[in-house]
Amino acid sequence: MLKLTTRLFERNRRAELADYYERALYNHVLASVAPDSGAVTYFTPLHGDFRTYLNGSFCCNGTGIENTARYNEGIYFRKDDTLWVNLYIPSELNWPEAGMLLRQEGDIARGDPVRLTVLKTGAHAITLNLRIPAWIAKPAALSINGKPQAVDAKPASYISLSRQWKAGDVIDLTLPVGLRLEQARDASSMVSIFHGPLLLAGELGKDKMPGSDVGDKDAFLKIAAAPVPNLVSTSGNPADWLAPVPGDPSAFRIKDAGPATGIVVRPLFDLHHQRYSVYWHLRKETFRDRP
């Protein structure tokens, strides 16, 4: 799907396509790799189960080296004298045709602002199109060389900056990250929790899990999934029942939400070698008032 999205974007430069690419990259492609070993998973269960990992790479298992190639492929796109910045991933772009060297810093997944520094540039004007994601929780803010800029920063759009850039120019872009719920299309009470672009998964532990990864499909199917407790709250705003985990800006602990209280949720790509769930039944009632 990322290959298809890339081809579609090359024909039609719509921010919605870049939003999809970002969502799939972080929440599926990156989540399929075990950070401790680099092994990839064949299947990513979503509700109370766990992933298993294999070192081999075949058609459905990381697709050889194609998986990791996606981490940098979709960051920048160019055409003539225009550059699209689609993904906010620390990187450096060397664009010899334009004589430009551009550095990107900041980790929006951890709440950092984005900083673009022009290290080198040619003698003509260049347009930078900076993506404003659909998931921003508040209006984006932009400054150039420390001076705030008035911009029309609508979600799922681009900010266009056209000028003759100079070496040393610095662009700072703040993209406010917030918590939100997304409902399943066929069941409004089934929800997933997102923090900005990141899908959050709940830690459900390792009880009765094998000591090593299960490579055999039949053996895997004999290991029971964990029960996923309900969320119980009158609020559909997860900020009302999620508390930040000290020292970990992308992790939250469920509070005052019925049976799920106490569970820690974190980005799916950060959670490995234990059971988890990304789907929750949300019962909109007051837990304390139940008989």
Image (cartoon, grey):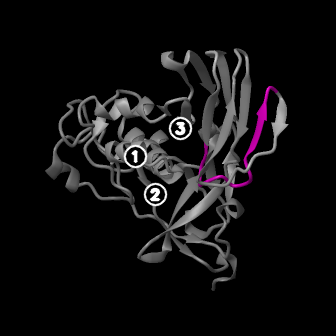
- Across and down, in percent, residue 98 comes to 54, 19
Q: Please report the residue visible at 80 percent of the width from the left and 26 percent of the height from the top.
A: 145
- Quadrant in the picture for the C terminus: bottom right
Residue at the extreme front of the image, as rendered: 124
Stretch in magenta? 131-145
Q: How many marks?
A: 3
Residue count near mark 1 (Cα–Cα under 10 Å), binned few <14, some 14–19, many ≥20: few
* Residue type pointed to by label 2: Val
Question: Does the rendering let one see residue 261?
Answer: no
Which residue: 14% across, 52% down?
218
Work out whether residue 259 or residue 150 is closer to the camera in this orientation and state it: 150
* In the displayed structure image, the side of residue 285 where residue 32 appears, left or right: left
Q: Tell me the amino acid under the disc marked 1.
A: Arg
Task: Count neighbours of disc 3 (C-alpha within 10 A) and say few if under 14, some if 14 to 19, many if 20 or more.
Answer: many
Q: Main secondary structure of the magenta part?
A: loop
Q: Are marks 2 and 3 in contact (CB under 8 Å)?
A: no
Three-letter residue code for mark 3: Leu
Secondary structure under tag 3 reads loop
Q: Secondary structure at mark 1?
A: helix
Q: Which residue is mark 3?
A: 87
- Alpha carbon separation for disc pair 2 and 3: 23 Å
Q: Which quarter of the picture shows residue 25? A: top left
- Closer to the chain start, of discs 2 and 3, is 3
Q: Position of residue 84 (x, y in %)?
A: 54, 36
Percent of width and height locating residue 167: 70, 14
239 and 157: which is toward the camera: 157
CA–CA distance in space, label 3 to label 1:
18 Å
Task: Say which residue label 1 marks.
Answer: 11
What mark, if any, has residue 278 been given in the picture?
2
